Amino acid sequence: MIGSIADGIEWLRRNPILIVVFLLYGLIELGAELLSPVGVVLTLVGWLLLPYIDGLVHVIGEQEASGESGDLGRASSTVLARYVSLIGIWIAYVVAVSIGFIFLILPGIYLAVRLSLAFPACVIDDQDAFESLSTSWSVAKGNLLKLFGIFLASLVVVGSVGIVTVLFTGFDSEFYITFLFLSALLTAVVSPVVQFALARVYLENRPTDETSTTGDDTREDDGWGSTSDDRTRTDRDDDRWDDANW
């Protein structure tokens, strides 16, 4: 988990344009909360924009992992080609996780983690919505603790900002506005790091010709915290992973 987040931070440092992209998204979300007349429209825009910008991070993450410099233009072309599938994944993800949270909190968290790799699977390996969800379900099985740790770390950061805001403003209207503004700024840094970390987890464990995306039985003994790097890395990435001691 720490290695994935550390690489995410480094990749973001080399691709600062993503901070601008996510800042714009955060400001759209801020406007959706504060500008009542157009809030619904801005919410819809943000909802449609999120799969695209997350996809950008995943593709650039693959470029960085392959030793290339991040190319935003090429990444954008790749993501736009898979955009319809990304929207399908996003809808399925939101519905599944929402249902999980309605019944009990833990099923919602479990589904959120188990399906989180569908987005990188879609744009990195050119899979459709159904294939991506199936791949994520399989690949995430042996990496649940790592994926949960990534999400938990991001929640701790956001929660810390909320606590600091309360200490300075108290629970009043000023707190709400200040927290939304700080959240928008935080989104510009935390969100791309999280998505880069997810991309790295996927790249380390992506299925190859020798591993089936539906072969859950082969991962049954892996447990929550293990990975299957040696079985699932692609041949073209092996040398890089080994040289970097991943």
Image: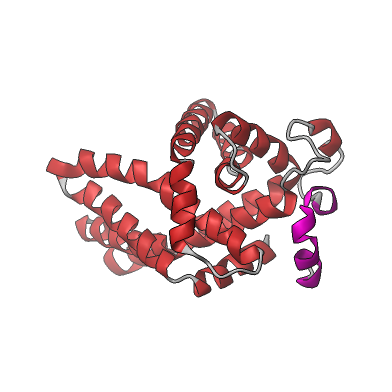
In the image, is 25 to the left or to the right of 52? left
Residue 111 in the image: state x and y as whole percent.
59, 35
Q: Is residue 44 magenta?
A: no
Judging depth in this view, the residue of 2 and 231 nearest the camera is: 231
Find out whether residue 235 is within the magenta segment: yes
Magenta span: predominant SS is helix
Q: Which residues are magenta?
A: 229-244
Q: Is residue 12 visible?
A: yes
Q: Looking at the image, which is closer to me, 107 or 237?
A: 237
Task: Please identify the quarter of the rendering in which residue 134 is found.
Answer: top right
Residue toward you, 87 or 63? 63
Q: Residue 146, image x and y in percent? A: 69, 53
User: Where residue 170 appears, x then y in whole percent?
Assistant: 29, 62
- Residue under the image location 59 percent in, 62 percent down: 63
Residue at the (36%, 66%) spot, across then down: 20
x, y percent for residue 166: 34, 62
Q: Measured along the vertical axis of the image, is residue 158 above or below residue 140?
A: below
Q: Nearer the viewer, residue 51 or 209?
A: 209
